[in-house]
Image (cartoon, helix red, strand yellow):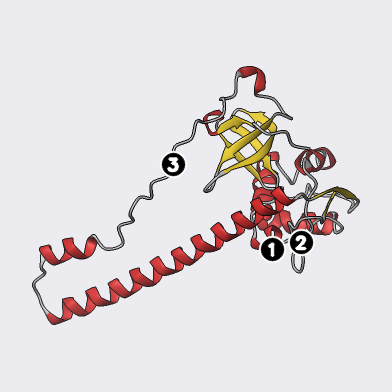
Amino acid sequence: MEEAQQKFSNSKEVIAFLADKFPNCFSLKGDAKPLKIGIFQELATRLEDDERVSKTLLRSTLRHYTNSWRYLHSIKEGAYRVDLDGNQDAQIEKEHAEHARQQLDESKEKAAQKRKAQNNAASQKQNSRQNEKASTTSSPARRNVEGKKGTKVKSSRPTKTPPPKLTENDLHAGTKVTVKLGKAPMHAVITEVAKDGIHVQLDSGMVVKVTSEALRLASSKRS
């Protein structure tokens, strides 16, 4: 009797599986293809009989995939999104491409800040070891001054009247909303209302989980 297939344990394994099962949609290297909005529902349906992939892991994997630099770089105005079989879907609009570029820029900036912080921490650790060797005593006043380095100055932003919050009647799949993730609200569509939060898909294709407090009704008409 054939043994039951072992469940996938992380996003890396699931991405490799998706690239093998849907090669015209997902890939592991090279240029990525923009995904059709609503691709999660298609995946959940096509894989509902595959016990190796849970919906929770599938959702987090899709979020990881669409948040990668390689994928965000593929979201360009005029390019076509694809379904699981590689068939062309809607074209990417200028607004969607700009959102993806903003996400890519912010992600690269965060990575640069993280590298800088790591380098600073390594440098401070090295200096601390050198100071300990040079003297058996430590100056608390000096440590307090050094500890204040890197304090970020809060930037002032103009206040705007926020769009209306969502009501219970709005909390369903298909509702067009805006969600505040970066420097500006991004357009999105509710894909699932679950116990652990509300799942929305951004125009870039990325799926994120948020609370209802983070959502507002989309004020502009979108195609």
Q: Nearer the viewer, mark 2 or mark 3?
A: 3
Q: Look at 65% across and 48% down and name the residue there.
A: 63
Structural crowding at the residue carrying mark 1, measured as other residues with C-alpha within 10 Å and reported as few (<14), some (14–19) or many (≥20): some
Name the residue that disc number 3 marks. Answer: 158
Q: Look at 79% across and 38% down and name the residue there.
A: 223
Tag 1: residue type? Arg
Residue 114: x and y, percent? 45, 64
User: Relative to the observer, which residue lies in front, 220 or 87?
Assistant: 220
Name the residue that disc number 2 marks. Answer: 32
User: Relative to the observer, which residue lies in front, 166 or 33?
Assistant: 166
Q: Please report whichever mark, 2 or 3, sits nearer to the chain's N-terminal start.
A: 2
Tag 2: residue type? Ala
Query: Is residue 50 rendered to the left or right of residue 134?
Result: right
Q: CA–CA distance between discs 2 and 3?
A: 37 Å
Q: Quadrant of residue 218?
A: top right
User: Relative to the observer, which residue lies in front, 89 or 91?
Assistant: 91
Residue 121: x and y, percent? 34, 68
Cβ atoms under marks 1 and 2 closer than 8 Å:
yes
Residue 47: x and y, percent? 81, 42
Q: Please report whichever mark, 1 or 2, sits nearer to the chain's N-terminal start.
A: 2
Query: Is residue 20 rendered to the left or right of residue 96?
Result: right
Q: Residue 32, relative to residue 217: is it above or below?
A: below
Name the residue that disc number 1 marks. Answer: 70
User: Relative to the observer, which residue lies in front, 7 or 19?
Assistant: 19
Q: Please report whichever mark, 1 or 3, sits nearer to the chain's N-terminal start.
A: 1
Q: Residue 164, relative to residue 84: is it above or below?
A: above
Q: Look at 23% across and 60% down and name the residue there.
A: 148
